[in-house]
């Protein structure tokens, strides 16, 4: 299923599956893909999907819509294309990443089959253990609840007030403001517009709710 990966400054803030014939993108909250930034027009662009074809159309936006660094009015999208609106980059993916291609081993001329004619690939090296982390809610009606940070991007907060994202990276987790007039607080200080790294025991406050980041 086609999907859009939205990022800013290299930090992924949301992932949207394209399931409709018409998906709108813009700053206004009624859009399917909301990007709360003044460089993005209220109704910036629309993504058309018909069978296996996907197109993006600029809706006369103030700052324009770019595909692979070129300004476009209407453009077919191909797997891996990068759309730019303001400072945001949106990667278009039409094929599932990380597919398992080891089910069939094909021998090309000149290749030597394994001893015994086995066609199974050699066992892969063990993958590194995933980084385990949770957000524990410390106040409010949901106090005591834990949110496991298993996905690449986890969004928290209250839409229209304050929404933040926690993105898993190879070296750990980073916190970023996504939308809303209120900035997240990290250990009592506003994080501003740039993503910040999280460490075990950090206290977060978002939309009046206190939380703690715990990584084991």
Image: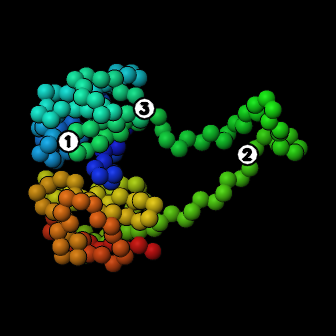
Q: Is residue 184 above or below residue 56?
A: below
Q: Position of residue 134 (x, y in %)?
A: 38, 68
Query: What residue sits right under mark 3 in the picture?
Result: 79
User: Residue 86, which numbered label?
Assistant: 1
**Residue drawn at point x = 18 percent, y = 73 percent:** 189
In what element is the residue under mark 1? loop
Q: Quadrant of the N terminus?
A: top left
Q: CA distance from mark 1 to mark 3?
A: 21 Å
**Residue drawn at point x = 23 percent, y = 76 percent:** 187
Question: Is any part of residue 18 visible from this angle?
Answer: no
> Residue 29's image quarter?
top left
Q: Is residue 13 above or below residue 132?
A: above
**Residue drawn at point x = 33 percent, y = 53 percent:** 11
> In this view, which residue lies farthest toward the right?
116
Q: Nearer the viewer, mark 2 or mark 3?
A: 3
Query: What residue sits right under mark 2 in the picture?
Result: 121
Circle 2: is it few (<14), some (14-19), or many (20+) Cα within 10 Å? few
Q: Nearer the viewer, mark 1 or mark 2?
A: 1
């Amino acid at each position: 299923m086609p999907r859009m990966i939205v990022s800013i400054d290299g930090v992924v803030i949301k992932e949207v599956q394209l399931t409709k014939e018409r998906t709108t993108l813009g700053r206004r909250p009624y859009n399917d893909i909301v990007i709360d930034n003044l460089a993005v027009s209220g109704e910036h662009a629309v993504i058309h999907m018909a069978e296996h074809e996907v197109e993006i159309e600029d809706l006369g936006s103030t700052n324009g819509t770019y595909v692979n660094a070129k300004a476009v009015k209407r453009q077919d999208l191909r797997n891996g294309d990068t759309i730019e609106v303001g400072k945001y980059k949106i990667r278009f993916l039409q094929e599932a990443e990380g597919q398992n291609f080891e089910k069939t081993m094909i021998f090309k001329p000149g290749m030597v089959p394994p001893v015994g004619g086995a066609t199974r690939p050699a066992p892969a090296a063990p993958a590194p253990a995933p980084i385990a982390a949770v957000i524990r809610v410390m106040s409010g009606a949901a106090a005591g609840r834990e949110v496991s940070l298993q996905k690449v991007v986890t969004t928290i907060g209250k839409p229209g007030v304050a929404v933040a994202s926690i993105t898993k990276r190879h070296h750990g987790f980073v916190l970023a403001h996504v939308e809303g007039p209120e900035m997240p607080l990290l250990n009592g200080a506003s994080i501003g517009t740039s993503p910040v790294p999280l460490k075990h025991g950090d206290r977060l406050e978002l939309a009046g709710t206190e939380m703690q980041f715990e990584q084991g």
